[in-house]
Amino acid sequence: MRTWESAGPGLTYVCEVSVNGVCVGETRGNPHTDVYQSCSHREFLDGRFQGSVRSAHGEKVLEEVIAEVRGWTGPDPS
């Protein structure tokens, strides 16, 4: 599992890649107000949440996340 965190205005953006898929969201330090969504590795490689990762963490982190997901799934067959 690998996690990226980026500070935002009064919150922290989070992206996590694990064996189960990709989770993106934000936290304000209170588990009752955390907001997260997840998708499979394949859905992420097909584009789901890539815009959210780019917006919250930047292009460099998006590239790292894609590489990490590919490490779980193997090379893109296309």
Image (cartoon, rainbow, N blue to C red):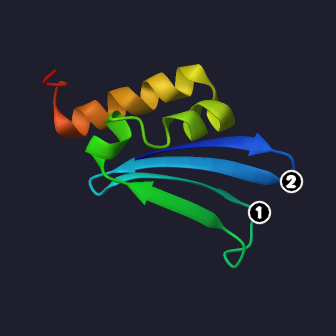
Q: Residues within 10 Å of mark 2 (few under 14, many from 20)?
A: few
Q: Of label 1 and label 2, which has the lower sequence position? A: 2
C-alpha gap between disc 1 and disc 2: 7 Å
Q: Position of residue 49 (x, y in %)?
A: 49, 43
Q: Position of residue 5 (x, y in %)?
A: 62, 43
Q: Are marks 1 and 2 in contact (CB under 8 Å)?
A: yes
- The numbered dot on residue 28 is 1
Q: Residue at x 59, y 40 (%)?
A: 52
Amino acid type, residue under disc 2 in the picture = Gly
Q: Residue at x 67, y 48 (%)?
A: 13
Q: Is residue 53 above or below residue 16?
A: above
Residue 1 in view, yes or no: no
Q: What secondary structure is found at the residue carrying circle 2?
A: loop
Is 61 left, or right, of 21 in this rendering? right
- The numbered dot on residue 14 is none
Q: Position of residue 70 (x, y in %)?
A: 26, 31
Amino acid type, residue under disc 1 in the picture = Arg
